[in-house]
Each structure stands twice: as structure tokens, then as C-alpha cells.
Image (cartoon, grey):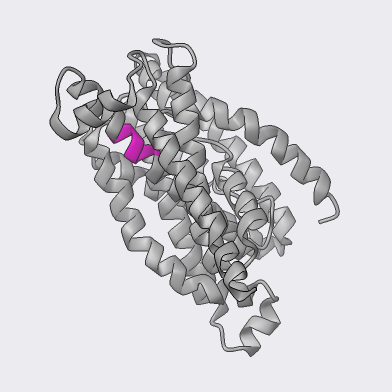
Amino acid sequence: MSVTLHHTKYLPWLTLAVVILLASIISLMVGVADLSLPDVIQTVMHGGDYDFVINHYRLPRLFLAIGVGAGLGLSGALVQGVIRNPLASPDLIGISAGAGFVATLVLTIYPNAPLYVLPIAAVIGGIATGISLLVITHYAHLTPARMALVGIAISAFLASGIDYLLVVHPIEINTAMVWLTGSLWGRDWEQVPYIWMTLALLLPVTLWLAWRLDVVGLGDDTAISLGVDLNKVQGIALLCAIVLASISVAIAGTISFVGLLAPHLARLIFGHHHKALLVGSSLIGALLVLTADTIARGIQPPIELPAGVLTSIIGAPYFIFLLQRYKGW
């Protein structure tokens, strides 16, 4: 009996890992040039006729899709854990919009900026938006549910600012629009270290926060009585969430609803304990973005849809469902 339970415990993790592996293989096979699995293996190992297609185009996109998805999923789980609101996510509370606004400002005013400038600009925008949201919430004494609504309002305001920038700078509109709809088109190995170094640095920190977030979920008074420094835990968790979301936005643009969907799916599969929830959200987020990018590239080649369009098609109806489910908040 114990052996069966032991194996059952790890079955969801194994299943998810296998699905991500299969999705990765399919991602390398799909595109303008449909390749067979032997072609992919041969090219990855030894190069050949498809060396550019696989090793310099699809493979970096594969690593970026997994990294960006993991960053957005982890960020969403942290935001929901701190705010204790199931409707919260980086894009819905304005963090992604803040990162997107400042990054768009850089793209339109300084289109030839060095590669490292965009992540820095996005992080500055995300942090500024997060601070603004916390200040408004503090002085208005808002509940977690209303905090999410304020975030939506901030996001809408920043979106109008992005539209203004695009109107004022029409020459750069094509590059900015592809980026704003959420796409890995045109990305290569140069962007890979940014997201993976961020994950390598912040994932251990989030796992250190895991049991503390479990305690915070019991309520402020309970958390304080159990010795948890509430402000410190919430501040570190929000900072990690903002950096993860901002770097992801800087690389792939605003891929919507991944930060909302991934934590909810992770709770259904792995439960509510944050140690499993954070890792599970990362993996599911990676799978969502990888799948969206593969479908976007392979649905009607050579035309390529933005991955953010596909995640929005799934995420928007799910958000409406959540609003109905938690309408009493």
C-alpha cells in the first residue's frame, strides 16, 4: 500500500516532465520546414542541412519558451500567494503592463539600444508599477480582491500610454506591435542567459519562501504569532515576482494569462502547499508558453501568430469563469 502511494505521489511530476519533453521534440520538428525526429537528432548532434533552422532558430526559441513560461508561472504563484487573491497575476495587476510600457518607451525612442537595456527598463517599469499598487492599496485600505481591481485599472492606464507611444512613433510600430502581442519571433541565443540566470538566482529564494507563504495564507495575525516577518516575506516574494515577470516581458513581450492559468492548474494537480505549487506553476507555465509558441509557428506556416494571442484565447474565458466563481470576494 505504501509503495503504491509513493509511486502515485510522483506520477504527476513524471507525467508533466514527459509531456514537456514531448512538446519540446514537437517544437523542434514544426515550422515552415517540417522535419522528422531523425532529422532533428542528426542536426542537433552533428549539424547538416538544417543546422540554422534547428540550432540557431528553433532550439533557442525552445529554451526561451520554457524559461519565459516558467518565469511567468512562478511569478503568478508568488503574486497569488502574497495577495491571497486567486484572481491576481502579474499581467492582471499591472506589473506586466508597467514593464511593457517602459520597454516600449525604450523601443520607440531608442530602437538601437543595446540588448541589456530592455530587461533593465522592463524591471524598472515593473517595480515602479508594483510600488504604485502597494501605495494605493495601503492608503486606501483595500481588500485583496479590490487590490486586483486597482491593478486592472493601472494596467488599462498603462496600455493607453503604450498606444500613445505607438501613435507618436509610427516608424517603430511594427517591431513594438509584434513584441507587445507576445512573441518569440526573432529571438535567438543572446536572450537565453537573461531568463535562465534570473530563474537560477530566484528559484532557490522562492523555495526558501515556500513554507512562509503557507503560513501567510493562514492570515496575518496567525503568521505573526508563528514568528513570520510578514513585511519581509511579502516584500521579497513581490520583488521576485516583479523581476521574473519583467524579464519575461522584456524577452517575449506581454504573453497574457500564463501567470493566472499556471498556478490554478498547479493547485489542481499538486495541491496548495507552496513548495510543490511554485515548482509546479513553473513547469506548467513552461508547457503553456512552449505549446502556444509551437502552435503559433506551425498552424499556418510561413505566417506566424503571436503566442500571446493563443494564451489569451484560453485565458480570457477562464478569467471570466474565475470572476463568477469568486464573485463573493
| Residue at the extreme right of the image, as rendered | 328
The location of residue 175, given as percent across then percent down, is 36, 21
Task: Give the image quarter of residue 68.
Answer: top left
Task: Give the image quarter of residue 100.
Answer: top left
Q: Is residue 129 visible?
A: no
Q: Main secondary structure of the magenta part?
A: helix
Q: With 323 as the anchor, is 279 left or right in this view?
A: left
Closer-to-camera residue (159/314):
314
Q: Residue at x 35, y 18 (%)?
A: 172
Q: With 329 as the anchor, is 21 left or right in this view?
A: left
The location of residue 83, given as percent across then percent down, is 63, 62
Determine whether 49 is above or below 262 in the image: above
Task: Give the image quarter of residue 113.
Answer: top left
Q: Is residue 69 magenta?
A: no
In magenta, the rendered stretch is 60-65
Quarter of the image with the N terminus is bottom right
The location of residue 251, given as percent across then percent down, is 35, 37
Determine whether 174 is above or below 258 in the image: above
Q: Residue at x 58, y 60 (%)?
A: 134
Quarter of the image with the C terminus is bottom right
Q: Residue at x 52, y 68 (%)?
A: 275
Determine whether 315 is above or below 214 in the image: above
